[in-house]
Amino acid sequence: MLTNPIAYLSQIEDPRRQNKNLLHPLKNILTIALTGILCGYSDWVAIEDFASENQAWFASFLDLTNGIPSHDTFSNVMKRLNKDQINRYFSQWINHNAPKHKHIAIDGKFVQGSHHDNDNLQLVSAYASEAKLILAQTDINDKANEITTLPQLLSLIDIKGSTITADAMYCQKDTTKQIIKQGGNYILALKNNHKTLFDDVSLWLNTQFDNKQLKVYETTEKDHGRLETRRYAISTELDWLEQKDQWHTLNAVVMVESTRDIQGKVSTERRYYLSSLTDLTTIGDTLRKHWAIENSQHWVLDVIFGEDTAIKLERNEKANIALLTRTALNLIRANGDANLSVKRHKIRASQNTAFREKLLFGKFL
């Protein structure tokens, strides 16, 4: 169960000049905005209308002496709020409530189709796969800081006892050092961004695997006309690897061979990983959880919350709305009804104040 996040988010520095003309406290704006998103409203005009229709309910726990903020007020504040602060307080909230996770997947996602924009916004999230909770987020401002993104993200959360999985972008020597220093383990995808290492590891694993010299773990999944067989192979013999000592606590290199049969069309792909873990079954199970992030987080944000089709906004406003959207999704996942879809949670919250209170506060008022 998650507690009310507003107690944390309200600590964000209000970007507006503090004077007698300031009609609406930041707490009111954040609470109403989050509640509107939780109830399925995706633009400020709709959220203002929703709040006006539910003003008596909001007034039961907010000081609405000056009424409901206008849609322009919501927009102006969200454009100016410090996104790094809101990210930090979000992380404090979720990690205080749910501090420990066996597996944390790191993955990036463009917001509002912004991979088509020059001023694109790509958010990188830390996602607890078993609890289905987003633990932290940060954004990649430009290509120059892609490498530093993951260390910044990991510094926001407690990863002691967790296994971190991430794509090749984040497969960096300093990253492995930080993960181990914070008490975690890692399984990091290896691709051509480390060409010499990739060539050495892939050649070794391919040769050993094809000659049946490696321990193999196999899984099969069948779904909607698709049959996928994954064969996981591991080598803990690394004396041949000249770069081994440059990667902190590197204990194994791993290969995953995926064979897909989609209505008779068969394709095979091999992927490679660096890992501090050595148990092949654990590695295989953890990697499958990482791949599930596409359906359990990205698809929900795009399709159910309409994030990828939302109206074009300024970058900072876009990032802050994305944070509130992830807060709403966490509340649904932790405080909701396991028998209801995310879409039905939003509909019921918009119509049932008791259900809305349970999602937002973790209890009935």
Image (spheres, rainbow, N blue to C red):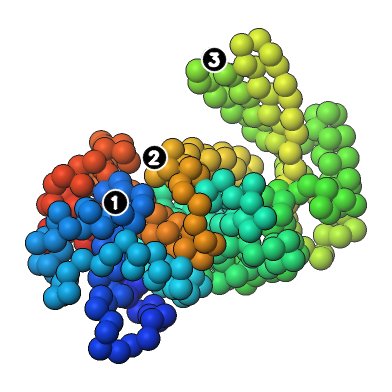
Earlier sequence position, callout 3 versus callout 1 = 1
Q: Amino acid at mark 1?
A: Ala
Earlier sequence position, callout 2 versus callout 3 = 3
**Residue highlighted by disc 3:** 225
Relative to 76, 119 lies left or right: right
Q: Secondary structure at mark 3?
A: loop
- Residue sitting farthest toward the top: 264
**Residue highlighted by disc 1:** 46
Q: Amino acid at mark 2?
A: Ile
Discs 3, 1 touching: Cβ within 8 Å: no
Q: Relative to 119, is 234 above or below?
A: above
Residue 118 in the image, given as x and y percentages of width and height: 67, 55
Residue 13 in the image, given as x and y percentages of width and height: 40, 81
Relative to 78, 255 lies left or right: right
Residue 72 in the image, given as x and y percentages of width and height: 35, 64
Q: Secondary structure at mark 2?
A: helix
Q: Amino acid at mark 3?
A: Gly
Residue at 89%, 47% in the rendered image: 200
Q: The C terminus lies in which quarter of the figure?
A: bottom left
The numbered mark at residue 304 is 2
Relative to 143, 308 lies left or right: left
- The label nearer to you, 2 versus 3, is 2
Specify the quadrant of the image occupied by residue 337.
top left
